[in-house]
Image (cartoon, helix red, strand yellow):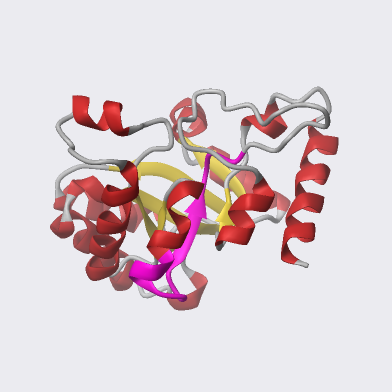
Amino acid sequence: MFKINIHLFTSVGPEAVHKIAALGPEIFLDLKYHDIPNTVAGAVSAACRLPKVRLLNLHTTGGLEMMRAGAEALAKAGLGDKGPQLIGVTVLTSLNRAALKQVGISGAPATRVPSLARLAKRAGLAGVVASPHEIRQIRRACGPGFLIVVPGVRPVTPGTQARSDDQARFATPEAAIRAGADYLVVGRPITAAADPRAAAQAIAQEIASAKS
């Protein structure tokens, strides 16, 4: 899949989805909705009808009713298996315990994330977005059929350690796959590489190796 985030979508809007969809791949529309239930329901209803969108997301911290409104809007679209799956962002990978405390959330991400994942499942979401550090806790809390989409993936360049960039909770592709991730989200390690194609191929090889 190709991920379209708020940067690209704000720049050119749904045209980005149509152009990438025309090339053939499916799309993760990473817009992270977070608003009142009615507004999120409207956004999900519109987004799920865009071509080739396979994953949509919203913030779990919007609460149970907001997540339910999004899930119900997707169900009402009647797209079935042809439509996207709705997933919830738990705690951003750029946040650590101190950053959470600054916004009034107590405890470490390792305790908050599984709780938000259980709430997302209760709301009818297909899965969550979480850092590699919480994969096993989520799997224990939500079971084998619950999707876990993992950003904060940083491959190791030969002879160096993995770069964290602005990620507080990150891991290598191999570690994330072995922990049980269903999807990996990889951005800057490819887009900022001197040879993006070679970087993508190397990451794909690391994923294949972790699965074997």
Number of marks drawn: 0
- Look at the image and say whether residue 144 sits in the magenta stretch: yes
Residue at image position (83%, 32%) is: 158
- Residue 178 visible from this viewpoint: yes
x then y, percent, for residue 174: 68, 51
- Residue 1 visible from this viewpoint: no
Specify the quadrant of the image occupied by residue 207. bottom right
From the image, which quarter does the C terminus lie in? bottom right
For the residue pair 68 and 153, the one nearer the viewer reads as: 153
Span of residues in magenta: 139-153
- Look at the image and say whether residue 179 sits in the magenta stretch: no
Residue at image position (14%, 46%) is: 36
x then y, percent, for residue 85: 43, 64
Residue at image position (52%, 51%) is: 28
Q: Is 105 on the left or on the right of 204, as rendered?
A: left
Specify the quadrant of the image occupied by residue 10. top left
Q: Is 30 on the left or on the right of 109, as rendered?
A: right
For the residue pair 160 and 120, the one nearer the viewer reads as: 160
x then y, percent, for residue 99: 29, 27
Q: Is 168 on the left or on the right of 108, as rendered?
A: right
x then y, percent, for residue 186: 62, 41
Residue at image position (36%, 43%) is: 32
Q: Is 85 on the left or on the right of 194, as rendered?
A: left
For the residue pair 11 and 69, the one nearer the viewer reads as: 69
